[in-house]
């Protein structure tokens, strides 16, 4: 986290200094993205000319991110009023911005990089409309004040620019403060070239929101990349062993194959072509092969895979523990660690969504004088977990004369309002 004094003057030159710091610290983010798309360390293993060198990528990183993102944000976030007020205007704005899709992108980036960014802006039209944009965390950051509140002072989004020949020519940068949006061009050496535009906005805060994946801003598979590397290495070497078993050396003992090198070569070719050979008395032939204990290797593979799922908190859905017709509560016990991980993500993600709602309310009030009470709005996350609807229906029926009907309806997963 970048932090400076709240009294610091915010200028494009200041933003460029922090862009340099961000670029220098981006190597870890690039590494995490490479793991997500399947470019793992095993692919750079050097090749030995005398041995097989298969390089298999078993992409647990993508599996972990896709599972957590789908479970956490597969169902859109619900916005409701505690007091029952009409918040249809807010819902219409979020629907027009396609916030559900934006939330999926934000959750995915948070899972990979440990944080994600969203920019709020208005379209450049005669009748501007509010839009949301998910920003690549490798091209954006937020700077906070150095107080205990850590309020955002400004955010920066920078985009590399290239010529027609695909040569880097500089950066197009957007500096977002609490009142202005400054667009400027920087050179490849991060020097200010020119300011393109300066415009005011009505969001009342920095319109570049940073979402945290957890308190340490770590990605969901970041701590298990070494285990993923070990798993890839083990699986690759298993294939290498099989390949080298096929390429075994034939040992011929007590048998003369020819008086000259040419005769020996001819005999070798005949053996290879016809697959048979004649032996003199006392002669012997056998294959020299590498011996390996497949059961021990399989035990190690299962151990590595179990550790990957254990320490990431993401279960293996193809595991035998998830087979059979399990009840809803049984499945929840099996997914307890996964559920706890998701609850942590939910708490931090909600902070960003509350800031989004607050800035939307500020913009709506500035443009139409309509007041949206953001303190009255509650967020509801629905996780895509298999439910036993029969059990839930029985529970609702038993409690119908005890618990208010509106509260009971919230127990049913197919009731969204």
Image (tube, rainbow, N blue to C red):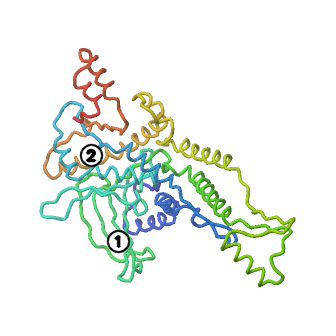
Direction from residue 344 to residue 252 in the image, left or right: right
What SS does tag 1 mark? strand
Direction from residue 181 to residue 255 in the image, left or right: right
Vertical placement of 363 versus 268: above or below? Answer: above
Q: How many marks?
A: 2
Q: At x 35% / y 68%, what residue is drawn?
A: 173
Direction from residue 69 to residue 224 in the image, left or right: right
What SS does tag 2 mark? helix
Camera-nearest residue between 203 and 161 = 161
Location of mark 2 (residue): 357
Camera-nearest residue between 235 and 130 = 235
Image quarter where the C terminus lies is top left
Mark closest to the chain's N terminus, 1 or 2: 1
Location of mark 1 (residue): 172
- Measuring from the top left, give residue 134's x and y in whole percent: 33, 57
Quadrant in which residue 136 is drawn: bottom left
Vertical placement of 340 versus 175: above or below? Answer: above
- Measuring from the top left, give residue 95's x and y in whole percent: 21, 49
Q: At x 27% / y 21%, what residue is drawn?
A: 396
């Amino acid at each position: 986290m970048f932090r400076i004094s709240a009294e610091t003057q915010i200028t494009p030159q200041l933003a460029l200094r922090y862009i340099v710091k961000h670029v220098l610290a981006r190597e870890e983010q690039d590494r995490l993205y490479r793991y997500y798309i399947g470019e793992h360390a095993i692919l750079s293993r050097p090749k030995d000319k005398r041995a097989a060198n298969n390089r298999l990528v078993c992409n647990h990183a993508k599996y972990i991110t896709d599972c957590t993102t789908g479970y956490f944000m597969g169902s859109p976030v619900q916005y409701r009023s505690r007091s029952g007020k009409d918040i249809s205007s807010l819902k219409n704005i979020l629907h027009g911005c396609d916030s559900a899709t934006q939330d999926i992108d934000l959750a995915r980036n948070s899972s990979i990089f440990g944080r994600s960014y969203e920019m709020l802006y208005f379209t450049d039209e005669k009748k501007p409309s509010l839009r949301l944009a998910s920003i690549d965390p490798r091209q954006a950051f937020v700077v906070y004040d150095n107080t205990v509140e850590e309020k955002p002072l400004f955010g920066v989004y920078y985009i590399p620019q290239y010529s027609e020949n695909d040569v880097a020519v500089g950066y197009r940068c957007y500096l977002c403060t609490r009142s202005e949006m400054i667009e400027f061009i920087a050179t490849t050496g991060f020097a200010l070239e020119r300011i393109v535009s300066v415009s005011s906005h009505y969001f009342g805060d920095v319109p570049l929101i940073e979402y945290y994946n957890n308190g340490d801003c770590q990605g969901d598979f970041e701590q298990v990349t070494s285990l993923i590397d070990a798993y890839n290495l083990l699986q690759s070497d298993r294939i290498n062993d099989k390949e080298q078993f096929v390429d075994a050396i034939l040992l011929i003992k007590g048998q003369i194959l020819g008086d000259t090198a040419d005769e020996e070569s001819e005999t070798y070719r005949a053996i290879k072509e016809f697959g048979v050979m004649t032996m003199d008395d006392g002669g012997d032939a056998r294959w020299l092969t590498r011996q390996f204990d497949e059961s021990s290797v399989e035990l190690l593979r299962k151990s590595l895979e179990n550790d990957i799922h254990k320490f990431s908190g993401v279960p293996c859905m193809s595991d035998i523990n998830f087979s059979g017709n399990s009840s809803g509560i049984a499945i929840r016990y099996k997914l307890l660690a996964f559920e706890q991980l998701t609850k942590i993500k939910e708490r931090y993600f909600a902070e960003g969504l509350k800031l989004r709602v607050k800035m939307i309310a500020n913009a709506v009030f500035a443009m139409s004088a309509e007041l949206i009470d953001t303190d009255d709005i509650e967020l509801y996350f629905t996780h895509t977990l298999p439910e036993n609807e029969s059990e839930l229906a029985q529970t609702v029926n038993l409690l119908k004369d005890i618990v208010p009907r509106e509260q009971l309806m919230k127990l049913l997963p197919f009731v969204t309002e």
